[in-house]
Structures are given as C-alpha cells and as structure tokens.
Amino acid sequence: MHTLRLGLIGSGFMGRTHALAAHSVGLVFPQYGAPTCEILADTDAAQAADQAAALGFRRSTGDWRELVADAQVDIVDICTPNHLHYPMAKAALEHGKHVYCEKPLALSVDESRELAALAKDRGCVTLVGFNYAKNPIITMAGNLIAQGALGRIHHVRGTHIEDYLADPKRPGGWRTRQALAGLGALGDLCHILSLTQRLVGEPVAVCADFQTVYRERPDGPVENEDQMHALLRFDGGAIGTIECSRVAWGRKNGLTLEISGSKGSLCFDQERQNELYFYRGGEGDPQGFKRILLGPDQPDYAAFCPAPGHGLGFNDLKVIEMRDLLEAINGSGQSWPDFGAAARIDAVTAAMAASFDSGGWVSVNTTNAGCSGTSNQG
C-alpha cells in the first residue's frame, strides 16, 4: 500500500488524539500501514514547532493555508474550532487532498452539502470524526439488527448528556459563541445522531425544544443552547427521542442508545463502552437484559487485545477511524461517515433548530435552515 502523508491542523485535545491514532494505526492494523506525519499547523509558528516536535511531525507551519497547499501532503486532518472546518476543508479539497475532519462538518447545511459535492467532484476520500460509531460494540449491535434479532424497529431513545458546562462559573469559550461554534449542546454532542444513522436510519421529521440555562458566563453571554430534546420520525417507520445537554451534573459521557423492536431490544451506554445489553422477546429471561461483553470474536477488537472483557478505550476508536480512512484511500474499503453522511446529520440538527424557531414539526428533507439557529431564546 502507498504510504500516505498526513498534515494535521490543530494540536489541542482532539489533534493529539488524531496524532496518536496516526502513529498507532500501523502497529494495530499492520496490513494497512501508517501515514507519515508530515506537517503540523497551529495558530503561530512557535506553537506549531513545539507541537510538531512533541507529536512526532517532520515539519511545522503557523499558516494552515501552507499545509493544505503542500505537495507533500496527501491527507488534511482538521482538528480546529467548528467555524474553521468549512474553509479549511474546502481549501483542502480544491487542492485535491483527502480530508479527515472533526464534527460538525460545517455551520450550515448549505456549506456541508457544498463540501460533500466538492469531494465527490474531485474524487477525494473524506471522513468525519464520529468516532463512537466505530466502537466494535456498535458493529455488534448493527449485526444483530441486520440479522433480524430485534424484528421491526419501532422506537429509539438516545441521549448525549455531559456536565462540562454545568458550573455557571466556568468560562464557555468558543463553544458558547454562535459565530464560532454554531449550535451549542446539540452541535457539540451530535454523536448520538451518528449512532442512530448507523443503526436505525435517517430521521425524516423532527420537533425540538432548546433551552439556554445559563445566559451569562465569566467570559461573556451564552449565544447557543445548553440543552435540547427532540421527537423524531425515522425513514423506516420508527419514532424516538433524542436529548443533549452540557449542563447535566454527574454525566461525563452520557451517550446512550436504546432501540426497541417487535422481537427484542438493545441498550448501549458509552460510559460502559465495552458492554451491550440485549433482550430477546419471548425467549429471553423475563426479568431483564443479557449483558454481552466485547471480545475478540467481534470485528476489530482482536487487533487490540486477545482476551474478552478487557476493553477498548476512546483513543482505540480513533485508531479504528484512522484505519477506515486509510483503507478507503487505498481502495479496499468505504469511508463512513463521509462528508455526505455528515451533511445529512447536519441537516437533522438544522431541522431541529428550525423546529425550535417555528415551534412545530419540521421535515428534514425540505428545510434549508442553517445549523446556527436562534437557540439562545430558550
């Protein structure tokens, strides 16, 4: 396989996880190789040089535009605040680069769709960082659903609730500014929509309510929502609810999903990411769910550990994500969620914002509302 060269933009928490994945993927999945960590870009030349040395990159630059235009870069990896995703991804695609971008893809549906169309036109492979969907336990859940273990799915209940802004004395930073973040809790915690997209299908209509609990923080006013809940109708006929919150004390990564069907149900909790709970109607224990532990019999787990129940972690999911990207670039697999899939997720969040603004149900297929919304009105 051709050795690909990676250019990373941003060296904060997420940038470091991407760098770790780039260095690790060839060890965990040797058949796919590892990219060369070619160049790192950050906010200024001095910081970029320091971080390039710390994260194992050959070169550095204080200007991301130099990185996307660099002839020695095959993959542009974007780990920056939300408002920079669109201009960086667009520039990278215009230079014919493959693009790996953190979510959300853009701050408006029109921008997301533009990027998806441009990627298709240029023949570039794209991937968006919904890493929780890469958990082998989610693959297990998908296989159970595909095999008909749940029957006809009729209800979905999902949450992504955390407490990183539960303290009103904590500064909100760029995440509370519409121009920089777009949506608030929903935009940041939209991972739940990647799980429902993977396991259930596409929402076709939504009815949502937003609320800003703390309108002022030490660093200024809060311009987007602290929490959101929504009703959803899915293309396969199921209905469901989704909740997001960044002010739920005690919840560290409360990404949960329960799917119920005519034959059974399953439950997943990211805080216990190596477990899946499954109930088979009519045949199982009438008192409760069966706990299934992740092990080497499930795809990808064995590459990390030969023993069941020992568990994978957050960074391992990023390694799987990186593997999927490399595999797709080399023509031996498909990249998901690509920019097209991410644009559909952005369309759902935009429909939720439009629903809140209008006070009623909104069709996901017909709305053109931007992802920023007026979510500070709750």
Image (cartoon, rainbow, N blue to C red):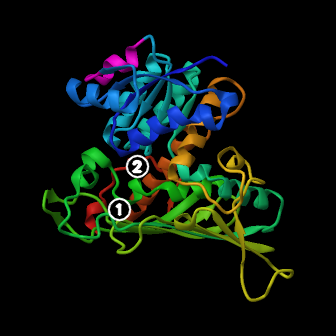
Which quadrant of the view contains residue 179?
Answer: top left
Which amino acid, by three-letter code, is at mark 1? Answer: Asp
Would you call the spot at circle 2 few (<14 residues within 10 Å), some (14-19), or many (20 or more)?
A: many
Q: Which residue is mark 1?
A: 357
Residue 342 shown left or right of residue 216 in the figure: right
Residue numbers of the magenta segment: 61-70
Residue beneath the point at 63% across and 38% down: 28
Q: Point out residue 303 in the picture as x, y percentages from the top left corner.
A: 68, 44
**The N terminus lies in quadrant:** top right
State the separation of the CA atoms marked 2 and 1: 10 Å
Which residue is at 78% across, 61% downward?
A: 144
Q: Residue furthest top?
A: 71
Name the outermost residue toward the right: 283
In this view of the protein, which residue sits in the foreground, 273 or 104? 273
Identify the element where label 1 is drawn.
helix
The reply to whether the magenta stretch includes residue 346 is no
**Would you place residue 173 above or below residue 115 in this image?**
below
Classify mark 2: helix, strand or loop.
loop
**Residue 262 to residue 142: above or below:** below
Instruction: Name the residue rendered at 32%, 63% in the picture.
Output: 164
Residue 363 visible somewhere in the drawing: no
Whether residue 64 is visible to the viewer of this picture, yes or no, is: yes
Residue 54, disc: none
Q: Residues at badges 2 and 1 in contact (C-beta under 8 Å)?
A: yes
Q: Which badge, 2 or 1, is on the more N-terminal residue?
A: 1
Q: Residue 264: x percent and y percent?
A: 77, 74
Label 2 belongs to which residue? 369
How packed is label 1: few (under 14 Cα within 10 Å), some, or many (20 or more)? some
Q: Main secondary structure of the magenta part?
A: helix
The answer to whether 164 appears left or right of 355 in the picture is left
